[in-house]
Image (cartoon, rainbow, N blue to C red):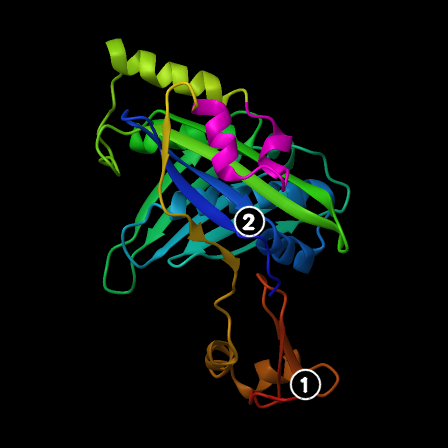
Amino acid sequence: MRETAAMDDIVLPFQVADTAVRGRVVRLAGAIDDILSAHEFPAPLSELLGEAVSLVAMMGASLKFDGKLIFQAQGSGPASLIVADYSSGGNLRATAKTTTSELPRGARALLGDGSIVMTIDQGPDMDRYQGVTAIEGESLADTAVAYFAQSEQIPTIIRLAVGRIQTPGAGEQWRAGGLMAQFVPQEGGERGVSTTLSGDDRETWERAKAFIETVQPDELLDPSISAETLLYRLFHEDGVRVFDAAPLRAACSCNEEKIATVLSRYGEDDLSDMVEDGAITVTCEFCRKDYRFSPAGAPLTGE
């Protein structure tokens, strides 16, 4: 795994002055380059997948327990599936499915009609929370805002950007960034309780929202603009507090033992059908790592 500058591969929580406007900024460099380069999808799909990773990183960083946040988009378009997940501690992974290499740009064009599912997995001893909403608007940010409005009833604004940036000494690399803000009267909010804005609250939210709407993609991607600098540009008149940044990394949960357990459930004939060139090769759909097993399903470690 590559090393990046301290201001990259982080998610930074913030609060606008002493108001109820809270949010997070994500900056991804090596982590998103590792994820997207492993798949080698066409650029439009890589960009959409990078947006999903940025989104899930900002949302997942708010988890108050050890667990996982899973974002999934399923649609009728040429990109039939997008999956990105965040695990406690900052681990990120993502994958997608497509039927063609000739792809349009934009979430709506790629996904078509369908839905997004947000799943919070608190571990084997706890119930999962799952929210579902239709794909709305033209962008992934539009759909995510609609999700919060419908499933959690929290005023939200989201900006996302993904692109390839020329890096000195390393050529072009993927970068991604995002900014997400919400009006949350109590830290963390209360799921399912409507936040009705009026009077000063509405003015506070509309002001913050107007500033965030000015954010340009290059400000989210430029390696010379830190998250703190971006927030200061936006909110220096009102004041902004930043909290401890959390690290992010590309990390998959696949391993040889898990795959061997799955293969052990197959019969001899089924295993035989999987053999190619004298071995069974299983490729992780997330990180694209290959695992090799004997025709009987035993790991061929060390090859």
Q: Residue at x 43, y 23 (%)?
A: 235
- 286 left or right of 170? left
Q: Could you tell me residue 257's position as x and y percent?
A: 47, 81
Q: x%, y% of residue 182?
A: 35, 29
Residue type at the position of mark 1:
Ala
Location of residue 291 with respect to 50 vertically, above or below: below
Q: Quadrant of residue 194?
A: top left
Label placed on residue 249: none
Residue at image mark 1? 279
| Tag 2 and tag 1, C-beta contact below 8 Å | no
SS type, badge 1: loop
Label disc, if present, on residue 8 of the rendered structure: 2
Magenta stretch, overall SS? helix
Residue 227 inside the magenta-drawn segment: yes
Please tell me whether residue 72 is drawn above or below residue 199 in the rendered image. below
Marks 2/1: CA distance? Answer: 40 Å
Q: Residues within 10 Å of mark 2 (few under 14, many from 20)?
A: many
Q: Is residue 137 left or right of residue 278?
A: left
Q: Which residues are magenta?
A: 215-235
The kind of residue on which mark 2 rests is: Asp
The quarter of the image holding the N terminus is bottom right
Residue 90 drawn at (x, y percent) = 44, 56
